[in-house]
Image (spheres, rainbow, N blue to C red):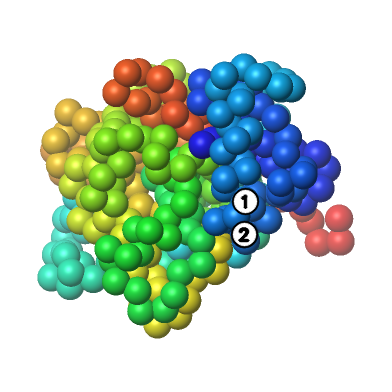
Amino acid sequence: MKLATLRDGARDGHLVVVSRDLTRMRAVPDVAKTLQAALDDWKTVARSLNVHYEELNAGRGDFVAFDPANCAAPLPRAYQWLDASSYLNHVELVRRARGADTPASFYTDPLMYQGASDDFIGPCESITASGEEMGIDLEAEVAVVTDDVPAGIDPTAALEHIVLIALVNDVTLRNLVPTEIAKGFGFLQSKPASAFSPVFVTPDELGASWRGGKVHLQLEVSVNGEWLGAPNAGEDMQFDFGQLVAHAARTRRLMAGTVVGSGTVSNRDERAGVCCLAEKRVREQLRDGQIQTPFLRANDQIRISMRDREGHDIFGAIDQRVEIFQSRSQGS
């Protein structure tokens, strides 16, 4: 099943069911007005949503054309956004570039932080920053959405609470990161609004590519139409999503609609490319002794997508332009 949210002037938009081929959609206010409402009663609501989904796939009943440009984030605001760094190749490269070792605990205990979740943006909305000097970067990731998760759950059982899967661009302002990390309280200003793929999909949509709590497909990323990378999200993932959800729920329950990100997808094989510019820059530094790749600039266009093994688009594309805005003066 594939679900999206359309902008309609309300904070949370309205839920639509989208056909498997991403061409048709149908609003379902009689079932759930918003995606969060559906998640709050998922076991009951999912069956009704799936009836609409099968009708759309068969071309039956009323429907209209699906256009990702009209989409908000499927969850325009979420109760919780937890982002991990489960591809340790990315961590190792970044730390090696600054002359630091990777602590042994990183291989047994997931890295995870709690991010701002009050404002997620749609797949075609601009990446905004007040200046290029902030070091604007994309981070292409996979994310999962849970129903209600009890505290202390084990990783295997945690997989049963994953109800939706998504792509995310976790935008980072790299030049603001060092100062924030030095304070010891984590990210805030260096993490502007993240963008989600046009649709969230249920795990069964991935077939055999969803196994072991991982998505075994390539995550395709380009900047200004030039290939940046296509690493396989199922490879080199130190902690699967069951482990990540269990880690988040170790001491507390998680509410329906919790979003857990994988962190920047990264493969050890350099031929797979990268999912963020920071990793490309680090590889240049380690290989050549100098960095050539700049961070994102005004009007740059980024695209993030994933296809199944038959080449069909699964989530629709995150397709964003970089926009520089003028900082507001006090009192304006």
Q: Mark 2: which amino acid?
A: Asp
Q: Residue at x 31, y 60 (%)?
A: 242
Residue that mark 1 sits on: 45
Assess whether mark 1 and mark 2 are in contact (beta carbons under 8 angstroms): yes
Q: Residue at x 77, y 51 (%)?
A: 11
Secondary element under disc 2, as helix, strand or loop, is loop
Identity of the residue furthest to the right in this view: 331
Quarter of the figure with residue 216: top left
Secondary element under disc 1, as helix, strand or loop, is helix
Using the numbered discs, state the Cα–Cα distance from disc 2 to disc 1 in whole angstroms: 6 Å
Q: Nearer the viewer, residue 60 or 156?
A: 60
When the figure is inspected, residue 178 is found, relative to residue 121, above or below; the finding is: below
Q: Residue at x 18, y 47 (%)?
A: 236
Badge 2: residue crowd in 10 Å (few <14, some 14–19, many ≥20)? some
Q: Mark 1: which amino acid?
A: Val
Badge 1: residue crowd in 10 Å (few <14, some 14–19, many ≥20)? some
Identity of the residue furthest to the bottom in this view: 251
Q: Nearer the viewer, residue 22 or 299?
A: 22
Direction from residue 97 to residue 293 in the image, left or right: right
Number of residue marks: 2
Per the rendering, the mark at residue 41 is: 2
Residue 58, x across and y down, in percent: 57, 19
Residue 315, x across and y down, in percent: 48, 32
Q: Residue at x 56, y 29 (%)?
A: 54
Quarter of the figure with residue 68: top right
